[in-house]
Amino acid sequence: MTPKSIMKMQQTIHISTPARNGLYDITRQVEAIVAESSVKTGMVNVYVQGATAGIMI
């Protein structure tokens, strides 16, 4: 794979979390970002900031 064939795209999803505990489903937001990108194959990397935050799949 040549460097020209690698496409980098970054989007940010902001979520207000009024409760200290909670699960927030971001599936639809991620799907929308991928659909808008016109990318046919690839990988999505999801990062969450915070020492006590986590991602569940």
Image (tube, helix red, strand yellow):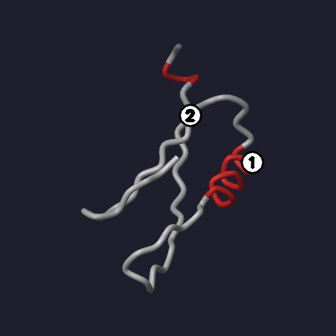
What is the crowding at mark 1: few (fewer than 14 residues within 10 Å), some, or many (at least 20)?
few
Q: Nearer the viewer, residue 57 or 40?
A: 57
Q: Nearer the viewer, residue 23 or 49?
A: 23
Question: Percent x, y for residue 25?
Answer: 59, 63
**Looking at the rendered structure, which numbered label has been put on residue 6?**
none
Which residue position holds label 2?
43
Question: Percent x, y for residue 19?
Answer: 43, 83
Q: Residue at x 39, y 58 (%)?
A: 48
Q: Provide the secondary structure element on which disc 2 rests.
A: loop
Which amino acid type is shown beneath numbered disc 1? Answer: Ala
Asked if 51 appears above or below 20 in the picture, the reply is: above
- Please state if 17 lies on the left or on the right of 5 as rendered: left
- Please state if 15 lies on the left or on the right of 40 as rendered: left
What is the crowding at mark 2: few (fewer than 14 residues within 10 Å), some, or many (at least 20)?
few
> Mark 2 or mark 1: which comes first in sequence?
1
**Residue positioned most to the left:** 51
Which residue position holds label 1?
35
Q: Residue at x 41, y 52 (%)?
A: 47
Q: Residue at x 64, y 56 (%)?
A: 27
Question: Percent x, y for residue 38?
Answer: 74, 41
Q: Provide the secondary structure element on which disc 1 rests.
A: helix
Which amino acid type is shown beneath numbered disc 2? Answer: Met
Question: Percent x, y for residue 44?
Answer: 55, 41
